[in-house]
Amino acid sequence: MSKLLKKNYKLISLVMLLVMLGGVIVYGVDTYENKVITIEEDKKISGDFIGTANQIINKGVISGDLITAAEDIYNNGVIGGDLLGISGKSIHVDGNVNGNLRLIGQDIAIMGEVHRNASIFATKIFLEENGVLDGSLYIFTGDLNVKGFVGGDIRGGAGTAVISGTVKGNVNLNVNKLFIEPGAVIEGDLIYTSDEEQVIDPTSVKGNIQFIPAEESGIQIGLRGLRGAFRILFNAIRVIYLISYILIGLLLIKLFKIPFKKTGEIIEEKPWYSLGLGVSTFIGVPLAVFILIITLVGIPVSMLMTTLYILLLFFAKMPIALWLGGKILRDEKKYYTSFIIGSLLIAALKLVPVLGVFLNIGLTALGIGIILITIKRYYKNEYDGGDSFPPVH
């Protein structure tokens, strides 16, 4: 498992760093490659801090979330919300986090206090002796070492897990090796799945101890590996698509900055009109194509309509991403950064089970309407020779 993680975490971290391109988002489109961003002790940031660099160091106070991608991440200060970090190397949590931890990296060490839950994907995870996690710990790692305090449960998978601290809840792990050190206290149940039964001191566990043999046939192992390979391939394709989508969007914004700027005005001016027009087009075009195909004579026209329809679907959410990112940044003039943030947010929303499907359809329909209105206005502007977009009638 440890070797597998060492290969996969680098791919995941690299991909996420590429997706979060554009430098420190709160400062615009500047990149901070091979640089260090430090929030000093006397610095207080109201709201969220979102940024990327070679190193991110927080010594001050962030009232909201810290959302970052960097080679190394250090939190020695106070975070009022969540810490969401993606690291190519290490993450050190040595301060106070009032919210949750959601981390991806190689070596992750918690030496401070986290008041809620921690979800961590890493090669190695350390909860040091002075580390306090008030909530539960959810992990997928090669090596887990818990010396500190966990107020909730520990759940997930690890190659090797060593517990010498205190766990107030249950421990439910899928492991190769499990060591409960002298002095460790597990106040709940200990349930572990492994290839072989581990030697556990029953005095360290106040609840029940349950061993679940990890028995799989050769066919089951093969199918699981095949599913995993397809899952990795599918996720890789999704990430490549997202990166390509962002790059194409940035190019289009550079070429057609004024029309893209006007789309934000349309969203605020006529959202329901745009949505209605988009829904009609979203449903009507496939029906029209179907009818044209049946007539045989209309097949060439149907092929052209299908091509334009696919392009429209591809570009549909770009205006919404630009507008949404501008609202988040509160600076709509930072077109490129706004588009990146908006695109990432929409991509994240699409991952929400069930709701994500409806959100994707709704945003696509809204985007189609916005694009059609923009084309109409732009055409009228060019045709009439005016300087501004005329209103939609």
Image: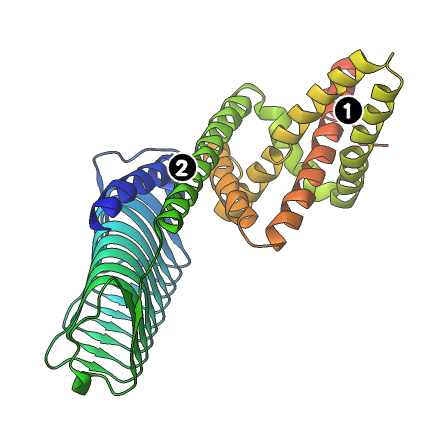
Q: Residue at x 69, y 45 (%)?
A: 362
Give percent across and percent down for residue 236.
Answer: 42, 35
Q: Identify the residue position indicated by label 1 in the image.
A: 376
How packed mark 1 is, by other alpha carbons closer than 10 Å (few <14, some 14-19, many 20 or more), is some
Q: Please, what is the three-letter code of the amino acid marked with disc 2?
A: Val
Of residues 94 and 27, the one nearer the viewer is: 94
Q: Identify the residue position indicated by label 2 in the image.
A: 19
Q: Residue at x 21, y 35 (%)?
A: 34
Give percent across and percent down for residue 129.
Answer: 14, 72
Of residues 388 and 367, the one nearer the viewer is: 367
- Residue 68 visible: yes
Looking at the image, is 171 positioned above or below residue 348?
below
Q: Secondary structure at mark 2?
A: helix
Q: Residue at x 40, y 37 (%)?
A: 19
Where is residue 383, by image quadrant? top right
Give percent across and percent down for residue 87.
Answer: 27, 46
Where is residue 125, by image quadrant? bottom left
Q: CA distance from mark 1 to mark 2?
A: 33 Å
Of residues 180 and 41, the one nearer the viewer is: 180
* Numbered disc total: 2
Q: Secondary structure at mark 1?
A: helix
- Residue 88 visible: no
**If you read the primary sequence from the N terminus, does the residue marked by circle 1 or circle 2 appear first?**
2
Of residues 198 and 5, the one nearer the viewer is: 198
Q: Relative to 103, is 231 on the left or the right?
A: right
Q: Please, what is the three-letter code of the amino acid marked with disc 1?
A: Lys
